[in-house]
Amino acid sequence: MKLEDWSPEAIAIDFVNKEDWPERRAKLPEPTARLANLMGFEANAGSMFVAPDLGGAPRVFFGAEGKEPKARDPFFAGKLATALPKGLYRLGDGVDAPAQAALAFLLSSYAFSRYKARRNEAPRLCAPQGVDRARVERIAAAVALGRDLINTPTNDMGPEALAEAALALGAKHGAKSRVVVGDALLAENFPLIHAVGRAAAQAPRLVEFEHGPEDGLRVTLVGKGVCFDTGGLDIKPSSAMALMKKDMGGAATALSLAAMLLDSETPIRLRVLLPIVENSISASAFRTSDVYRSRKGLSVEIGNTDAEGRLILADALAYASETPPDLLFDFATLTGAARVALGPEIPPFFTGDDGLADEIAKKAAAVGDPVWRMPLWDNYDSGLDGKISDLVNVTSGPFAGSITAALFLRRFVSHPERWAHFDVYCWNPSTKPGRPEGGDVQAARVLYELIEARVEQRNTNS
């Protein structure tokens, strides 16, 4: 995902809004103003008008959103990437946030082309002057990495391939990596990861890599890597199984965020843990009513084999907590309840620290990466208590599924005040500016911003 070198020969794109268009039109050369009237261009949001400038070169007038900030889509400029014909363009007058506009253009330019080539040559955009081009490209490339992983079907993105993608990212930056596969999970005390994934043709595994200075801010990322979720013996209906290739979206999100941090050489001690499985059905599949001892030592009774993501995360979070980081983030396409509550665009997050929650919310608003805090409601925690085990993986009632899933995970975290759990969806049901239909990465950009700010604050205070 690249921007082009700035060129004065590129076609300029001026952003105009409906309120200011009459005044702007009055200052245009008479032939251009007459042509705008003839074409009926009134600078409605998303509309475009192409006319020659004073020198005869083409110029694009793009109808921007209104002046009310609350009504604005931060990626509205991404419409240009799919509406413009091929050619080289540059941002012209009226652009309030050129870096955001450039990022929106790149994110909208994404197309998954592993199996089907693009039909038309895409327009190209010059890097705006004065913008941190490397940062914009870094974020766009990392998001594209995550999108590619999510969009790839399981026949080409099973546990082996996902692990290879993670190890390749670590190797690119010289990270210290390892992978624990199959029965070695039992030998190294990851029993829940093994139980969930043992029925699949490709063995379950845990990928781990670590990079950065030992004295840096310690950040650990954990991502749910269920490459396909049949639901196990509690099998899903076909309608619910249609998008289950995206059930490794948490791992893809963790890798996307890791790519941003590694490519920017942010001076942190980064640790990435990905429990990777396929929740399949065979003679060795784990069963409802089975009881397993977790890495932390807590016994877990299986109430539903389709609540498998929290099981593999439990072992990974317990492992992460054995060397407590300064910040611990996990990402998982965990519950349908989160979608019922907030829909596909807004992932809920949970944390035991009000200060961290406020920081996440402020950064999310600043970068246009929406998330919404939901409560770790202690009154619901007792619903996870087991009768013959320390806990069960699902509660008996139909309510608060996203909250109780987060409470389950909290039991395996040693310092909840340093932890945040993101119940992501990782899929765009339809195309919107900056968010093409298909797999997507949620919450990575906000945490990239937050971690960089924490590093800067740490350096200032040291």
Image (cartoon, rainbow, N blue to C red):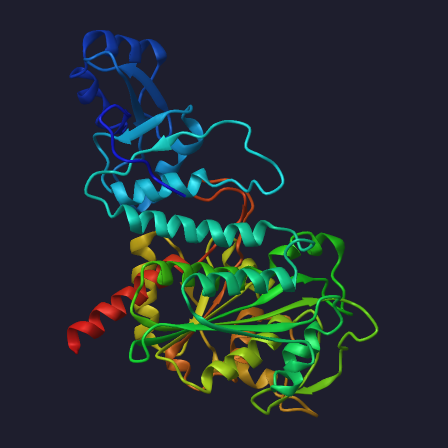
Q: Is residue 289 left or right of residue 418?
A: right
In the depicted view, which residue is nearer to us: 38 or 315?
Answer: 315
In the depicted view, which residue is nearer to us: 23 or 189?
Answer: 189
Give percent across and percent down for residue 81. Answer: 41, 33
Q: As displayed, is residue 36 above or below residue 291?
A: above
Identity of the residue furthest to the right in this view = 283
Give percent across and percent down for residue 421. Answer: 46, 71
- Is any part of residue 60 visible from this angle? yes
Residue 418 sits in quarter: bottom left
Q: As displayed, is residue 274 above or below residue 10?
A: below
Q: As displayed, is residue 182 above or below residue 106?
A: below
Give percent across and percent down for residue 461. Answer: 16, 76
- Is any part of residue 395 visible from this angle? no
In the depicted view, which residue is nearer to us: 160 or 105?
Answer: 160
Give percent across and percent down for residue 123. Answer: 40, 29
Q: Is residue 182 left or right of residue 13?
A: right
Residue 275 sits in quarter: bottom right
Residue 35 sits in quarter: top left
Q: As displayed, is residue 402 above or below residue 191?
A: above
Q: Can you say which quadrant of the picture contains the N terminus?
A: top left
Q: Is residue 456 left or right of residue 288?
A: left
Residue drawn at (70%, 67%) of the image: 279
Q: Is residue 377 left or right of residue 241?
A: left
